[in-house]
Amino acid sequence: MTARVYVAIKPTVLDPQGQTICSALNGLGHREIISVRQGKYFEIALSDGISHDSAVKTVEEIARDVLSNPVIENYRVEILD
């Protein structure tokens, strides 16, 4: 079983790295790019014996407590069977 965790800065939080990337893309001639928000992606392999419900609970806990900062970031978890 595999879990995917996507972490992104909340829309209300300034994203200086995303702004820098956007500026760099514009400088390279990609004027159609008006905004970039950067984030993180994690792919987590889970043991074969874990139940789907237990996987969801474990990965949600890891995403909330370890992989993201809930003050400034949102996260989304996907479990692939």
Image (tube, grey):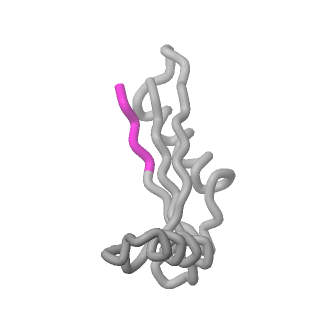
Q: Quadrant of the N terminus?
A: top left
Residue 30: quarter of image: bottom left
Per the rendered image, the range of residues in magenta is 77-81
23 displayed left or right of 65: left
Q: Position of residue 8 (x, y in %)?
A: 51, 64
At x 55%, y 43%, the residue is: 42
Nearer-the-camera pick, 14 or 67:
14
**Residue 65 location (% of width, % of height):** 66, 54
* Number of marks present in the image shown: 0
**Residue pictured at 49% horizontal, 15% vertical:** 48
In the figure, 67 relative to 14: above or below?
Answer: above
Please tell me in which quadrant of the rendered image residue 69 appears: bottom right
Residue 1 in magenta stretch? no
Most common SS among magenta residues: strand
> On the rendered image, what quadrant is the C terminus found in?
top left
Closer-to-camera residue (8/76): 8
Image height check: is 76 above or below 10? above
Q: Nearer the viewer, residue 11 or 78?
A: 11
